[in-house]
Image (cartoon, helix red, strand yellow):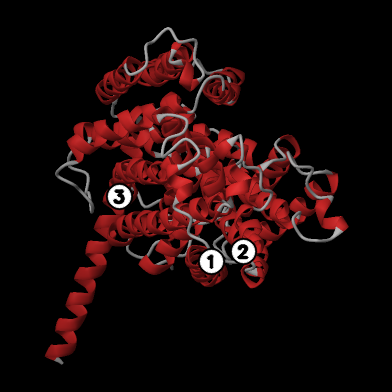
């Protein structure tokens, strides 16, 4: 089967990575991914959808991200490999489920890179220069804007080309700046203008109903923002002590970001001038550079200048991080057996998977050409991200069932409760994404299947091999995921009108149905897991690494005794 690779090949490629990232660097990576363009636009988009209740949307988003992140923390510590997020489904369920999860995850992450470049240019269009205003037409980037965003993409990849140590030093410095500026922005806006009438007036706390709060979680950029918790996991192959540092980095990055995002949302809600709300209320907001425009409105010109500068720094820092993590994801997909071998090569001198980095640059250019606005990219990324989330809860409990003796540096006793809850949360957010967006993104998942078909069926046939017998257990184990996507698309279509559906499911009952579907497919998925070749191989690799580490420790102990005796 194409899903198995020689042990020596994989270990050889991973030996070229540098295990140089500690807890602080990994936390900076996670926090730097979360605080990107989301903080520049998320507050306005969430307020336009949910009004003042957008505050709760950020809290709900953090809760969803945290429960799902806990499942991935156990997996990341178990398998400290580059591109970790694209591997776990392969280990637990084999080729089909692993590929679908990897495809969804990669689409969600690689499209963030042009999104960050787009955010920088969109903010730049508010500068008081004719050439700057010509970069954005109010809905999407112009041709000139796309050209400038393309230059930024090249810059992101250039910083990743040379060495992981350069990336770590650059990213940590940028992350400090990215944290300081949002905190300063929230504080300055609150001091400049804090109009509590914005909460009580204009339709009250929930002007568009509670359903709008849930939709804001799914499509306003909240999922986009919190999705950054993946970055430390995808750099697990370069972590010095993954068992301790990965969980800390993931959890702390989410919690710190939650405090910052809630503060920014409150500041934005209170700082919007009353005349901007008008007859349309919160839904009528239409700032090109939301926080900078508010700073100008209240005479904080120094803050506006700082925000214009940070509109390059924050998205560029996140774009740089995602350029690094997506290249590791491509390496992981190649080692799963679904890309040519060249994309598994890691440069020996720099520890960077350069061919994978180049592939992602090309794909980022394609996304930039098709989706020229931050909002449209945020919607696609958010829903694709949620689809990729469902793998973690199922995989973590599946591996406890089929590989109970595997070393787990992180093992939560409450995981049997957290995992199904995380699956329900992920299903709800997918549903909240609204039809037809959910259907469109699920269709994008199907677009990637020809690649899987080629590597699992077409290529073996051209080599004179019959793949059907070996493929059957992979199809059986992955059937739950295919069925899940189809069922969720159907429920989204038939669901409540407030979520874009036809209204066949009554309000309230649609949420119950989606939660029940999430639980049903969670238990089906766990029962479908099997000891496939990828799992057997990685178990052997882990045992070999443990034996080598034990031998090294024994050798050091013997050396110490000899020196004492001498």
- Between 197 and 329, the one lying in front of the other is 197
Residue bearing the label numbered 1: 192
Sequence-wise, the earlier of marks 1 and 3 is 1
Q: Residue furthest right?
A: 130
Secondary element type, mark 2: loop
As drawn, 120 above or below 330: below
Residue bearing the label numbered 2: 298
As drawn, 395 above or below 412: above
- Between 192 and 427, the one lying in front of the other is 192
Q: Is residue 519 left or right of residue 187?
A: left
Secondary element type, mark 1: helix
Q: Is residue 561 left or right of residue 463?
A: left
As drawn, 533 above or below 256: above
Q: CA distance from mark 1 to mark 2?
A: 7 Å
- Between 479 and 225, the one lying in front of the other is 225
Query: Do labels 1 and 2 touch, CB within 8 Å?
Result: yes
Split into 4 quadrants, where in the image is the C terminus? Answer: bottom left
Q: Position of residue 105 (x, y in %)?
A: 49, 37
Residue bearing the label numbered 3: 542
> What residue is shown at x 59% (from left), y 19% (from top)?
458
Q: Is residue 27 left or right of residue 153?
A: left
Q: Position of residue 83 (x, y in %)?
A: 47, 47
As drawn, 469 above or below 389: above
Q: Nearer the viewer, mark 2 or mark 3?
A: 2
């Amino acid at each position: 089967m194409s899903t198995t690779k020689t042990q020596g090949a994989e270990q050889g490629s991973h030996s070229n990575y540098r295990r140089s990232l500690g807890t602080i660097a990994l936390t900076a990576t996670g926090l730097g991914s979360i605080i990107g363009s989301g903080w520049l636009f998320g507050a306005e988009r969430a307020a336009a959808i949910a009004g003042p209740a957008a505050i709760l949307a950020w809290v709900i988003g953090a809760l969803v991200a945290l429960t799902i992140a806990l499942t991935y923390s156990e997996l990341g510590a178990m398998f400290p490999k580059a591109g970790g997020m694209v591997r776990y489904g392969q280990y637990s369920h084999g080729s089909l489920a692993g590929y679908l999860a990897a495809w969804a995850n990669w689409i969600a992450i690689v499209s963030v890179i042009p999104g960050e470049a787009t955010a920088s240019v969109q903010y730049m269009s508010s500068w008081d220069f004719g050439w700057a205003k010509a970069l954005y037409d109010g809905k999407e980037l112009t041709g000139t804007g796309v050209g400038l965003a393309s230059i930024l993409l090249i810059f992101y990849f250039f910083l990743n080309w040379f060495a992981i140590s350069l990336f770590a030093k650059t990213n940590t410095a940028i992350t400090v700046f990215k944290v300081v500026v949002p905190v300063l922005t929230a504080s300055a806006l609150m001091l400049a203008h804090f109009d509590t009438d914005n909460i009580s007036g204009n339709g009250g706390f929930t002007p568009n109903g509670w359903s709008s709060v849930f939709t804001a979680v799914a499509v306003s950029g909240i999922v986009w923002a919190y999705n950054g918790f993946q970055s430390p996991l995808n750099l697990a192959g370069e972590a010095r002590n993954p068992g301790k540092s990965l969980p800390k980095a993931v959890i702390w990055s989410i919690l710190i970001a939650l405090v910052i995002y809630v503060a920014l949302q409150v500041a934005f809600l209170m700082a919007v001038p009353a005349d901007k709300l008008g007859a349309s209320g919160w839904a009528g907001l239409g700032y090109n550079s939301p926080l900078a425009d508010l700073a100008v409105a209240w005479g904080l010109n120094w803050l506006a200048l700082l925000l214009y500068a940070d509109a390059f720094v924050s998205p560029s820092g996140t774009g740089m991080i995602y350029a690094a993590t997506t290249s590791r994801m491509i390496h992981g997909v190649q080692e799963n057996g679904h890309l040519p071998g060249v994309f598994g090569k890691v440069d020996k001198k720099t520890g960077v998977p350069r061919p994978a980095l180049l592939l992602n640059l090309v794909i980022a250019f394609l996304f930039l050409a098709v989706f020229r606005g931050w909002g449209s990219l945020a919607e696609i990324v958010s829903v694709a991200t949620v689809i990729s989330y469902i793998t973690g809860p199922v995989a973590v409990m599946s591996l406890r069932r089929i590989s109970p003796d595997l070393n787990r540096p992180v093992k939560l006793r409450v995981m049997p409760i957290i995992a199904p809850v995380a699956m329900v949360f992920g299903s709800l957010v997918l549903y909240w994404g609204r039809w037809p967006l959910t259907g469109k993104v699920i269709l994008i998942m199907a677009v990637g299947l020809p690649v899987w078909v080629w590597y699992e069926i077409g290529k073996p046939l051209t080599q004179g091999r019959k793949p059907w017998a070996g493929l059957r257990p992979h199809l059986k184990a992955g059937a739950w995921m295919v069925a899940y996507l189809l069922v969720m698309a159907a429920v989204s279509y038939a669901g409540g009108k407030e979520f874009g559906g036809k209204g066949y499911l009554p309000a309230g009952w649609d949420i119950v149905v989606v939660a029940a579907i999430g639980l049903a497919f969670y238990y089906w998925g766990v029962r479908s897991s099997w000891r496939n070749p990828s799992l057997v191989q990685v178990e052997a690799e882990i045992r070999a690494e443990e034996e080598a580490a034990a031998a090294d420790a024994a050798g050091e102990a013997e050396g110490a005794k000899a020196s004492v005796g001498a």
